[in-house]
Amino acid sequence: MTQRQNIMRTAERTRKLTSFKVVDFLEAAGQLEAEGRDIIHMEIGEPRFATATPIIEAAHLALDQGKTAYAPSCGIPELRLAISDHYRHRYGVRIDPRRVIVTTGSSAALGMVFELLVNPGDGFLLADPGYPCNANFVRRLDAEPQLVPVGPEHNYQLTADLVNRHWQANTVGAMIATPSNPTGSVIDRDQMSGLYRAVTSQGGTLVVDEIYHGLTYTAAPPSSALEVAEDVLVVNSFSKYFGMTGWRLGWMVVPETFVDLFTVMAQNFYIASPTLSQYAALAAFQPETLSILDGRCAEFQQSRDYLVPALQQLGFAVAGLPEGAFYVYADVSALTDNCEDFCWRLLNEHGVACTPGTDFGQYRASQHVRFAYTEPLPRLQLAVQRIERALQS
């Protein structure tokens, strides 16, 4: 048998995809740990806490009851109802449970949203900096991620004015995240209303990432986009506030007219979300569990309140306290002219893993680094000591 000499053909669109640098650093950190190094993880957006006990107990009960078969494609009815009730209790919004689509993590939801809305050649407005995978979801459809530069003067968010100024002939929608990744900024209800009007007046669709809802540190919790309008697509997750990263479970709330389309996509793309995870997630909305989760949020706030001034004292520039999530997006231009080299040096020489700003877009990206404050406070204090030594060396 002769060996094939030609290179196997691959789709052109795959060459446009960018690596997810946070995962690159996570895997490199894991390799160093395997070699016996102590690594402080400030790169990955994963709550440090184990999944709350009531959720674990619910999973054990479901397993004992043999709930291991395929679930309905859009989620078990009990969970769709529980999510609907969550919106009624937390936001005062009544949602038909049929509009709730349970997904295999928010990534599956985001992928299906863009599959629904975007044709080849279309454009979609995204904030820059922003969650990097969103641009790749658009690219994989042979469409154009239209990155809109946002800085502290915009609270790192799209605004109605920016939408109107950057809308192009091929633009079909805009996506926002509140709280945002990597900056933790929040959009209030009036701003959300303005964005909705700006997008819909252009004939587009507004997609809202609410994955970090529950992890906010403002006096009043952020509004859901569903308080503003029904014809938005909202994506959420059990990974962040609910602390269920490895359970791979998320959801979206969609307009009634899209339910059947999403059902067909779910059937074809992943058949159903993990059954055991869904029964476990039923316990996530119990008062006992929510009390645990809110206590964890308070600990994240303490970590934020320590880390931001500590980094500022070392020469990092941070545009105010993040309003939500668990990230600090720090300007390192006074310390280095290459954020990626800076992050690799911190990891390899000093055992601190963080993420270069180049993971999150193009606008002033090389001047920034993202730190996740998900480690316990003593570990964050040790990280600051190591960073200080790195800056002195």
Image (cartoon, rainbow, N blue to C red):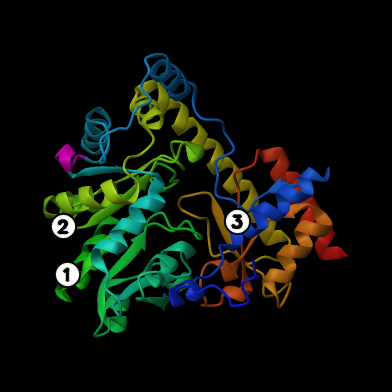
Asked if marks 2 and 3 touch (Cβ < 8 Å), the reply is no
Q: Is residue 126 above or below residue 64?
A: below
Residue 38: tell me if it is visible.
no
Q: Secondary structure at mark 2?
A: loop
Instruction: Determine the residue positioned at 57% across, 33% down.
Output: 49
What residue type is disc 2 on? Asp
Q: Is residue 237 above or below residue 85?
A: below
CA–CA distance between discs 2 and 1? 10 Å
Q: Is residue 8 above or below residue 236?
A: below
Q: Nearer the viewer, residue 230 or 330?
A: 230
- Percent across and percent down for residue 168 are 27, 84
Which residue is tagged 2?
231
Mark 2 / mark 3, whichever is N-terminal: 3
State which quadrant residue 137 falls in.
bottom left
Q: Which label was assigned to residue 200?
A: 1
Q: Tell me the magenta residue range.
A: 92-98
